[in-house]
């Protein structure tokens, strides 16, 4: 990883004004860090995973029609590692880019799920502490709830990292609960 967390944070804030999108990127960063620990990665690899999560949607607000190509190109221009570039390029199932690493598959797996968990927290008293795996599963079945969240991506993501959906939700929920104050939830 060539970029520091501080450099990634500055880039993110130069491209995103929406505080909720910043929080989404922080949530994905936390989930990536949680999974780096789960898979027993080194501190250096964990930091790489977290920075990748932080930057995955950096260009979405200003360049929605070119997302994620703008941030991918910026990372290439910085000489960033190929695994980081692939993970961000492949983080949306609809992008048609094959994830080449576990990091890329985990990023795909947590992206939509963090959004669903936050949406559940918002109807549970604006508190992540009030959210349980079963409440996320229940809301996942309600197609009228959080319509923008792609349930198939969540299911496919869990399959790609070879975890049962319930366990995957539990890991991601735990990660978000660990930064509840930052997320103001």
Image: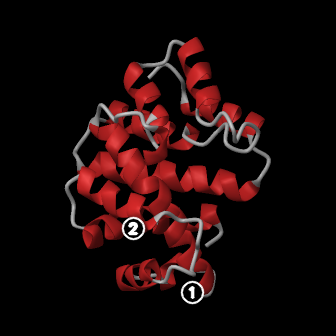
Q: Quadrant of the N terminus?
A: top left
Residue at image x 64%, y 37%? 9
Q: Quadrant of residue 44?
A: top left
Q: Which mark is residue 173?
A: none
The residue beneath circle 1 is 124
Describe the colour scheme in one phrase.
Answer: secondary structure
Q: Is residue 58 left or right of residue 76?
A: right
Element type where label 1 sits in the image: loop
Say whether residue 1 is left or right of residue 27: left
Number of callouts in the render?
Answer: 2
Residue at image coords 57%, 81%:
144
Up-down relation of residue 71 to residue 141 (above or below):
above
Which mark is first along the chain, 2 or 1? 1
Quadrant position of the C terminus in the picture? bottom right
Q: CA distance from mark 1 to mark 2?
A: 16 Å
In the rendered image, residue 119, in percent from the top left (x then y), is placed at 58, 74
Answer yes or no: do the residues labelled 1 and 2 have beta carbons within 8 Å?
no
**Residue 148 at x, y = what percent?**
59, 65
Looking at the image, which residue is at 47% across and 82% down?
139
Q: Secondary structure at mark 2?
A: helix
**Crowd band around label 2 with a 10 angstrom C-alpha radius: few (<14), some (14–19), many (20+):** many
Q: Residue at x 26, y 39 (%)?
A: 41
| Image spot of residue 152 (x, y percent) | 39, 63
Q: Residue furthest right?
A: 17
Up/down of 182 relative to 80, above or below: below
How many neighbours does mark 1 have within 10 angstroms: few (below 14), some (14-19), or many (20 or more)? Answer: some
Foreground: disc 1 or disc 2: 1
- The residue to which callout 2 is attached is 174
- Counting from the top left corner in percent of width and height, residue 114 is at 49, 62
């Amino acid at each position: 990883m060539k970029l520091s967390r501080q450099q990634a944070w500055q880039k993110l804030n130069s491209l995103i004004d929406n505080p909720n999108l910043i929080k989404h990127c922080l949530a994905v960063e936390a989930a990536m860090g949680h999974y780096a620990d789960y898979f027993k990665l080194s501190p250096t690899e964990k930091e790489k995973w977290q920075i990748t999560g932080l930057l995955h949607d950096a260009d979405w607000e200003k360049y929605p029609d070119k997302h994620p190509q703008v941030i991918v190109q910026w990372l290439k221009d910085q000489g960033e590692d190929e695994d980081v570039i692939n993970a961000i390029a492949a983080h949306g199932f609809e992008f048609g880019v094959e994830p080449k690493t576990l990091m890329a598959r985990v990023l795909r797996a947590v992206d939509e799920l963090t959004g669903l968990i936050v949406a559940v927290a918002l109807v549970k008293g604006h508190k992540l502490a009030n959210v349980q795996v079963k409440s996320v599963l229940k809301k996942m079945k309600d197609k009228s709830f959080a319509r923008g969240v792609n349930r198939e991506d969540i299911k496919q993501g869990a399959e790609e990292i070879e975890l049962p959906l319930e366990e995957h939700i539990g890991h991601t929920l735990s990660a978000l609960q660990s930064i509840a104050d930052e997320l103001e939830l």
